Amino acid sequence: MQWLHCLPEWMRPPVLTFIAGSAWSSGSGALAAVAVEQALRIDPGYRLARLLGRAVELGARPRRCA
């Protein structure tokens, strides 16, 4: 997340959402919540970030592939 300031603002929400998804799937809900919050601060209408943020907020856990 340290290099995000190097990206143009319009590119940050997808990257932050990717970071959030990766963090969430590895068990770091706090990092996921922060990344989603930052993505939505930049683009409140970014639907994937909203969806992932809701899942993190509800405490839903991603299923592991067998």
Image (cartoon, rainbow, N blue to C red):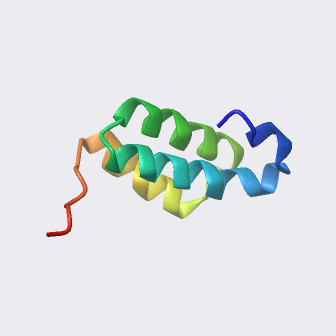
Q: In this rendering, is residue 34 above or below 65? A: above
Count of marks placed on residues? 0
Quadrant into which the N terminus falls: top right
Look at 50% across and 62% down and name the residue there: 48
Residue furthest out toward the top: 30
The location of residue 29, given as percent across then percent down, is 35, 36
Name the image quarter holding residue 30: top left
Look at 62% across and 46% down and name the residue there: 39
Q: Is residue 17 left or right of residue 8?
A: left
Q: In this rendering, is residue 62 above or below 39? A: below
Residue furthest out toward the bottom: 66
The location of residue 34, given as percent across then percent down, is 51, 33
Q: Is residue 50 left or right of residue 2?
A: left
Q: Is residue 45 left or right of residue 12?
A: left
The location of residue 47, given as percent across then percent down, is 53, 62
Q: In this rendering, is residue 23 above or below 50? A: above
Look at 19% across and 61% down and name the residue there: 63
Q: Nearer the viewer, residue 25 or 49?
A: 25
Q: Is residue 37 left or right of residue 3?
A: left
Name the image quarter holding residue 51: bottom left
Look at 82% across and 49% down and name the residue there: 7
Residue furthest out toward the front: 66
Quadrant into which the C terminus falls: bottom left
